[in-house]
Amino acid sequence: MTAPLLRVENVSKRFGGFVALDNIDLDVAPGERLGLIGPNGSGKSTLVNCMCGTLHHDTGDVSFEGRSVDGLSAHERTRLGMARSFQLPRPFASLSVADNLRVPLLYTGLHRSGAESSSGELDDRCHDLLGLVSLSHKAHKLPRDLTQVEMRKLELARAMAADPKLLIADEAMAGLSQSEVKDIVSLLIRLNERGVTIILIEHIMTAVMSFSQRLVVLVSGRKIGDGKPDDVIRDPEVERAYLGQ
Amino acid sequence: MRNSLFVLLAVLAAAAVYAAARIVDNPYVFFAGYVVLQFVVLATAWNILGGYCGYVNFGSAAFFALGAYTTVAMVKFPALAAKYLPEPLIAVTNLIFPLPIPVLILFGGVIAGLVGLGTGYLTLRLRGVYFSIATLALAVVLQTLVVNWDYVGGSRGAYVVRPATTPFFGIDYMEYLFLMMLALSVATLAAARSIERSRLGFGFAAIRDDELAAESCGVPTLRLKLVATALSGAFMGMAGAPFPYYIGFLEPSSAFGLAYAVNSIAMPMIGGTTSWIGPLIGAVLLGTLQQLATVTIWSELSLLIVGLLLIGFVIVAPNGIVGLLETLLGRKRTEPARAADAEGKA
Ligand SMILES: Nc1ncnc2c1ncn2[C@@H]1O[C@H](COP(=O)(O)OP(=O)(O)O)[C@@H](O)[C@H]1O
Ligand SMILES: [Mg+2]
């Protein structure tokens, strides 16, 4: 196997006395499409927060492209190429939809590719991204004028705007219609085909199964399954702990 | 609109203001106008941190006073030099001093900017009301230091004698100070405006709206907050630098006056905090109103007016006059800015 893009080793996280993550080990290969599932409260978002520097884990190590990112702040990790969407969308409320995308474009995407961003290039990228999540018609609206579903799309587009090598989508599809879920899944697959490694956290099983090349299951902060999606969901332990609920 | 075009228009507007003031031909116009312009700079400076980044600074008076006391320290320097320095250095000192107003403005800006940077550094992890309380504490600490620092006059205050002549065709000194403040207003407004739709401005806005999301978009929030506290502090210090010459006698209670802290918050809030024009409108309106109240009724009344207006606006129109106008005209906030951008490219 090639060197992993993301390596999580022995990561534990407590909130007070509550163990949210219990010695998690996880390698993500470059170019992989990984599904991460688990019941509510199993620690999926907490794991994302620890990977991306929003939270600091108590033990263990997270490395990206072979180097530890534990000492790096969230924005430094984003600039290295890790981007995430928040489960509860956190748009910049006073900025228009297009301007929401300008923030990561100005601070990471174009920044990293070296080109000093001309305003025209920026507009083009904004326009493309909005087109990808079909929000072009709302470009000049404020986030408060968006529906919940549109807000999720904006959240996803904003993570994509950071031009990541690893994109982590934390339940980006809740509340979307079936056809919208399909659209987003195929969008993520297209993105993946362009070389972006993706971790998809999702409750909608059809989406997870059609998207994932590999499936990881968290239950109560422990990893109890990791492997080919079809095998994992048939694993008796997974069935008992998760699907059988 | 391009930044250079904006500067050109602002300079033209400033020239018009100056011409109008000359036509009125009453020294009081310069005297009162100076105060209004000083508030334009203060309000715009406050807004860089308060409006753009969402960090409410209660300690504006401290930064203003820093600028003013930097000037006092410079004015007093030749006397100090005469006492302690060897003869040749005294000669050099007398050659350089007294420093011209623009240089003093620069010094005041640097000192207040550095203190702003330090404040930012110490309060980086404080948010919301805790940050505001820290700035208030800073004002108290600085005032205490100044009160106990004899070199700048301590609690007794310090006299600053205006030079008999001005470098500009011998115009009246008050008129000269007015011109300096007018130029500083143009510079501050141009700086604030150029930030708005720049990379820095988008970073500031992201911080104001959601720091966690800003970080995850690659915005170095801690560093940007330092930039904002330093810039905001620097412009406030610049506003204060010529003040000792304006007032002639500077004491801590006037430099650290409540009026500065209150007005620097009230003017942007009443005008509107999301763009450069809000603080300008607020400062011109409230500044003029207070000058009128001071001459016609009684000076203590002016702060009362400001307080009442502030309460009214916070309740009725939290987005200030600019927000009110936008609602009335039914325009969405971001569209004019985009149209302006398109013009700039064309
Ligand atoms: N900041 C926090 N403080 C205390 N408890 C938290 C915090 N964040 C998450 N938790 C708890 O950790 C557990 C895992 O949460 P989370 O990672 O959000 O789960 P998931 O994303 O899998 O639904 C939950 O029980 C949640 O209540
Ligand atoms: Mg979650």
Image (cartoon, rainbow, N blue to C red):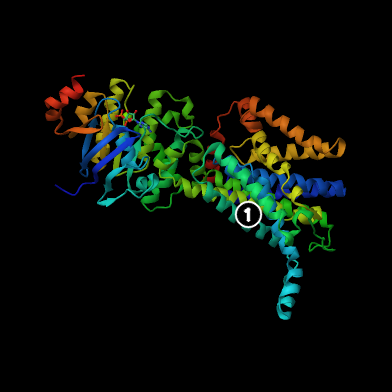
Which of the two residues, B336 or A53, is positioned nearer the viewer here?
A53
Q: Residue at x 32, y 36 (%)?
A: A14
Chain letter of disc 1 in the image: B
Which of the two residues, B25 or A25, is positioned nearer the viewer here?
A25
Q: Residue at x 72, y 80 (%)?
A: B88
Write down the quadrant of residue A24 in the picture.
top left
Please identify the quadrant where the C terminus of chain A is shown: top left
Name the spot of residue A79 as percent of width and height, x first. 36, 48
Mark 1 residue type: Ala
Write down the quadrant of residue B133 in the picture.
top right
Q: Quadrant of ligand 1?
A: top left
Secondary element under disc 1, as helix, strand or loop, is helix
Name the spot of residue A152 as percent of width and height, x first. 37, 28
Name the spot of residue B15 as percent of width and height, x first. 74, 50
Q: Which residue is mark 1?
A: B112
Relative to A37, is B171 on the left or the right?
A: right
Q: Residue at x 45, y 36 (%)?
A: A98
* Image: A157 above or below B114: above
Q: Residue at x 77, y 48 (%)?
A: B34
* Image: A27 above or below B169: above
- How many tags in the picture? 1
Relative to A100, is B123 on the left or the right?
A: right
Relative to A190, is B227 on the left or the right?
A: right
Q: Is residue A212 visible?
A: no
